[in-house]
Amino acid sequence: MTEEEAFEFVKNTLKEERITPYHKNEIEIVHSVEGCINCGLCINHCPVVAAVGVDRFTGPRSIAVELSRSPPEFWSTADKIYLCTGCGTCREVCPKNVNVPEVVNLVRARIFEHRPDLVPKGLHMVREIIVEHNLAFEPWEDPEEKVESRDVRLERLDIPYTEDIIKKNAEVLFYPGCQAEERAQEVREAAKVVLNYFDVDYTLLDDMSCCGLPSALMGDDETSQRLAGLLKEKVAGLGVKKVVTTCAGCTSNISDISLQDQWSIPVYHMVEYLAEEVGLDRLKQALGSSKEFSEVTVTVHDPCHLIRHTSRRTMQDAIEILKVISGVKVAISEAEDSCCGGGGLVAYHSKDVADSVVQENLISIDKTGAERLVAPCPLCTAQIEANLFKSGSSVEVDDLMVFIAQRLPKK
Amino acid sequence: MSESDFDVVVIGGGSTGTAVARDCALRGFKTLLLERDDIASATVGTCAGMISSGLKYMDEPEIVDMCSEEVVHLNRIARHIIMKNPILTPILELSDLSTGGNFAAEYSKRAESRDVPPVMFLEPEAALEIEPLLNPDLISSLYFEEYFIDPFRLCLLQALDAQENGAVVKTYCEVIDIVVRDSTVESVTFYNRVTGEIESATTKTIINAGGPWAHKIAAQAGATLDLRLNKGAHVILDRRVVNVGVITKAVDGRMIYLFPHENTTLLGTTALDTWEDPDTLVATHDEIEYLLKSIEWIIPSIREARIIRTMEGVRPLVPTWKVPEGEVTRGYEVIDHESEGVSGLVSFTGGKLVTCRHMAEAATDLISQKLGVESKCTTHELPLPGMESDVDVLSIAKEYDISQHALERLRARRGTQIMEILDLVKEHSNWRTTICTCEPVIEAEIRYSIRNEFPQTLNDLRRRVRLGTGPCQGTFCTYKAAAILADELDLTGEDYLVDILDFRAERWKGIRPPMRGPQLAQEEVAQGLYACVGNLDQIETEYDPKPWEEVG
């Protein structure tokens, strides 16, 4: 037997034994989980455990000390491991910085490879869409309907439409992410209005493609890597110097992949970009004197992918920005940084769990007395809005970019 | 006085003793098994669980044949508690390549019968893809596959099967005298540590499977037995840190290994001639460093991995002296003490986990002859309990609303026996509660074990259900499990506390020697729980600290 044939044989045995060797870049994650001292602090902070109890979701501690110990048995964790929303609260409160969100993805990747039949069906459906369209949502069948939907939204929100700009060598690539591209189109349009207002030299992608986060979350590493590579190519082809996005998930994921694949350009959330590159002074000039809007008390929701996966600084920036807008009062909710339930693709297969998780937020939002909630992420916005509506709350919900774009003087 | 007139009394409840008791019982002999502690509580409880094909003993081809054949038998009778491990032997130096080649040829002769491939050679890139932690300077790598068994469950299943077939199994019964009349064994006298009574049993024959204590047992009958006692240490790492097993040369040229086993990784082993008391032996600093240094050449980052504990055991080798340990045969001897005037007493020296059934067969054949009956060995054909059929974990998880992973672990320990445990859940739905969070272990399994597998202590439960063997080393399960044990066995408050102290002491025995890094933080949590919350250091009991516990 040649060495090549031997290797093929061994790979086959490993597959039979359900072992996918840890890759070099996973070793650090495995090592981090070894740090768990079973203290259980995370269980009291896990929003999923709080919402559905430890019998349904055994929680981050069980992922660390029990479920992630032996790869040949990973398949048997499928009834629990997909219920993690990946919010990262456990990692934040952990005295040993155990990286549970990442080990969840690692386990999911093994199930995806060895027991795809145990991956929830809802995730397979998302996967098929991603593989076919390079987007996390089924694109509009009729492009004209997409335009109509966009225009209805813009009219309702009183946001002007501006032409898409696609060009080479712009300063900034504005990357709306799949949700704002296909669903919450008002967020994409609002961001363009804001970028235009502050004379940012930006471009869009001529062909939007997913950053790969949903694929990584369902364990489809191959697709997530392909999409990351595709985006890298597009970014390099455009010759931009910065990437700006309005989606929290895209922010954290593109930050990660750009570091891993050495893009050598910075990645910003729009909030961060406005605070750092445009500056509060210019924002105040533009937003601080309008009399057009009546006074409003807003509360915010902190997307997990910003505060826990990227930086807590971004939400401080968001609040600073809100404070310079005339007539805006900010009321902080007790659960501002609690997961909305929309993470980890949980809603695609266990909607009851995702919706239970958001309840905590709803109660606290109500308590603030705010009339409006803003969040710098179209996914969180959609999850909270739908559940507030269902609960009969009068609190309205906006993506932060929409809220800002509405209040900018018309140019 | 208890039951008497046994055909055979087996002394020792390790892998060999339980195998002998099973064989004798299956052949219809009236059998009594006496174990002074618990089943699998000594040598076999500290092994790596490899049912070795004899890969270390290629210059003893008849032993390799025997090992290889026994692997086939074990796979036939105990498939439900066996796992396969792919193994790499990376080669760093050219000179090792030819030794590797010789090994490959000898090993490969018997591979097919065990349903594993012949030894293969892999390119460095391939080996590194399979195991990225390897030293990238390797020049080639051998690959082969070996089987691993749960040694605790093997011994227990052999004991239970013996019981099922009429044998009397008594744990915590220490033989204190063997009465010989007219140069023939007549009876054994033993101290029952549970009842505190001295009992005896008359018997026609005695099989001494006392492992590292076998010479002392022989002496009670006035017989002599020479043993070469040799101790070995394992370092146990949290979780599977390597994708496959790794075997390499140690600092002194011996071979050592790093094996994924269950949900841990085992690094072993040392081999040192010893005259210490096997009961109080702990791994030494030298042994731990020997193992770490040795594996470090091939896995440079090994010291970053979390060490949970060490375990130390004593091998009762065949007494070949004035040669290095590695040159002592891995075969075994069945000693008939008739030649020195003690008729009816048979002892073992040597042997290995994988040959325990074979040893039992040989000794039982001899006993059969002594009893003057014709009998046939069936231990290689009849399955051990739990192997009746496959278990569909996914469907029973749904039916009983228990986590799939908890059930998969349960299945791996017990095969079809799992259904009897789930019957308990049907009656008591709250027994689905997780008691040990690391393994995990549910209450129903603990209750089932107490009712059917004769454990007396938390340590016995640990051997049966893996209680407290995870990274937290019983930080959270001890009180919970002790309460269940006290409930089932009707223990007094005093006994309950002493057993908790005993269990903690036994964990400490392995935790302390290698304690460093993350395990220090873990031990702080344990200390906080047992001393600061439980006030366990303040209670007054009849507890005597163990030799390895510092009294301060």
Image (tube, rainbow, N blue to C red):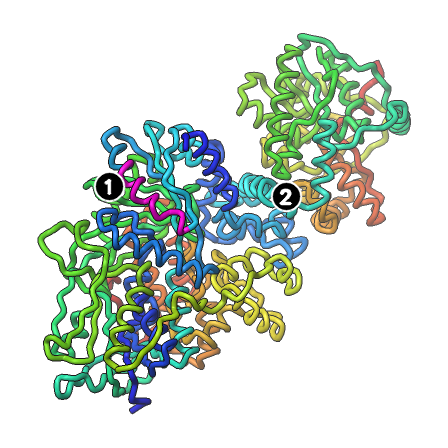
Question: Which chain does the numbered disc 2 sit on?
Answer: A
The C terminus of chain A, quarter of image: top right
Please, is residue A281 above or below residue B469 in the view? above
Q: Quadrant of residue A205?
A: top right
Q: Is residue B552 left or right of residue A299?
A: left
Q: Is residue A147 left or right of residue B238?
A: right
In this view of the protein, which residue sits in the foreground, B440 or A125?
Answer: A125
Please, is residue B93 above or below residue B33 in the view? above
Instruction: Decide whether the magenta segment is chiefly helix, strand or loop.
Output: helix
The segment highlighted magenta reads B101-114
Q: Residue at x 80, y 45 (%)?
A: A388
Q: Residue at x 59, y 31 (%)?
A: A310
- Name the residue tied to disc 1: B250
Q: Quadrant of residue B342?
A: bottom left
Q: Position of residue B436 (x, y in %)?
A: 48, 61
Q: Residue at x 86, y 26 (%)?
A: A146
Give the structural element (helix, strand or loop) at label 2. helix
- Name the residue tied to disc 2: A116
Q: Position of residue B332 (x, y in %)?
A: 22, 62
In this view of the protein, which residue sits in the foreground, A165 or B126?
Answer: B126
Give the structural element (helix, strand or loop) at label 1. loop
Q: Residue at x 16, y 58 (%)?
A: B274
